[in-house]
Image (spheres, rainbow, N blue to C red):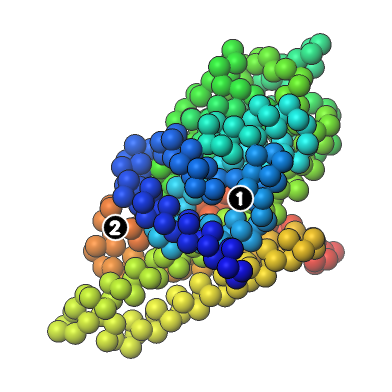
Amino acid sequence: MSSEREALKETAREFTRREVTPYLQDWEDAGEVPRDLHGRAAKQGLLGVSFPVDVGGEGGDLLDTIAVMEGMFEEGASSGLMAALFTSGIALPHLAASRNAELVDRFVRPTLAGELVGSLAVTEPGGGSDVANLRTTARREGDEYVVTGTKTFITSGVRADFVTTAVRTGGPGHGGISLLVVEKGAPGFTVDRVLSKTGWHCSDTAELGYAGVRVPAANLVGAENTGFAQIAEQFVVERIALAVHGYGIAGRSLALTAAYCRGRETFGTALIANQVVRHRLVEMRRQVEVARTYVHEVARRHVAGENVVAEACLAKQTAVEAAAHVCDQAVQLHGGTGYLRGTEVERHYRDARILPIGGGATEVLTDLTARLLGYTT
Ligand SMILES: Cc1cc2nc3c(=O)[nH]c(=O)nc-3n(C[C@H](O)[C@H](O)[C@H](O)COP(=O)(O)OP(=O)(O)OC[C@H]3O[C@@H](n4cnc5c(N)ncnc54)[C@H](O)[C@@H]3O)c2cc1C
């Protein structure tokens, strides 16, 4: 790793020790992170990493984003915290890529400065996996679109100042989808439900209602009916990021468990003195190392410009399976303590459960991978 990237990672570690871990349980209990955390992360140069400087970002690439995430996970940031703090990573890329100066000035710059919170709304109550069949409509009327529909499971949707919303502007299927920025306060745009979840407690999740919301046509992102392609283009980065969540919380759970096994005594000796325990720690380590190494490789190839759509799916699956196993074993080796609210490994265990569902369910990504690799009839 370059010395610059190592310095960025150290900044992320230091930020997490100072600004995140002392307060994380309070935010878990409150169901959201404070808005000013975004400003503090921006001031530290963390929020805009991998966004171009000319849209208000810090520059750098996906490997820098990974360094920030790894540094934060190493110090105890949770998967939910990262989802809530870095929702900009899914809400903004399409706007930044559109090079639309007005959208960049109104939404991208202030969000990367930590002044606004944005969300991405694709999923609907009728289904999330089948993006091409989404039903929320946007009908053009003069200089406006009229948006009608419902979105659900939207990360940071309770707090969001604006929501990059996938809408149907054209005919059926993927060719009729556009992206439209809908702003808080627009008449008819409502947070209908605050969703309570198994994990990711500090990450607010909303069901959003659009009842004939009038949205300026200037809020269209890219060309009309190109929304599906824009969403699909960003999926690779989202899947790699969720893979980092997977091995990130797994690696942290392993570190906590190894320390616990040194200190905890049963039958007159330290837990780690049992060969079966040591071997279990080694297996946990193996899964973390394999996931980290493969995810790095796929990210490096993505940054080099290679098409890694299939590999990003494999990387996500490898890392989320590692998280499922390692976080489960971390709870097991902590015994009853591992089952208590407030014990860190318990939080990671619950947070891990969303990873094979969000950003593309494992079955859906596996099917996509089969098609991309030519395993078809
Ligand atoms: C905490 C959280 C945060 C989220 N954040 C966001 C967000 O910010 N923005 C957003 O737009 N969405 C968000 N989502 C939605 C997420 O992307 C969807 O939950 C996911 O895409 C799956 O969609 P679904 O829940 O409708 O499941 P469905 O599409 O109904 O699928 C249900 C299950 O069926 C299986 N399955 C589906 N299709 C197939 C198939 N073809 N073959 C075999 N099995 C299949 C899978 O196991 C899948 O989990 C979030 C979800 C959660 C829980």
Q: Which residue is mark 2?
A: 343
Q: Residue at x 58, y 59 (%)?
A: 66
Depth check, front residue: 134 or 296: 296
Q: Residues within 10 Å of mark 2 (few under 14, many from 20)?
A: some
Q: Secondary structure at mark 2?
A: loop
Q: Is residue 314 above or below residue 93?
A: below
Amino acid type, label 2: Thr
- Which of discs 1 and 2 lies nearer the camera? The answer is 1
Q: Amino acid at mark 1?
A: Val
| Residue 71 visible at all | no
Across and down, in percent, residue 194 comes to 45, 31
**Residues at marks 1 and 2, CA–CA distance in whole angstroms:** 31 Å
- Coordinates of residue 228 in the picture (x, y in percent): 77, 40
Query: Viewed as shown, does residue 279 lie left or right of 115?
Result: left
Q: Is residue 104 visible?
A: yes
Which image quarter is the C terminus in?
Answer: bottom right
**Image quadrant where one finds the N terminus:** bottom right
Residue 90 in picture, x, y percent from top left? 63, 43
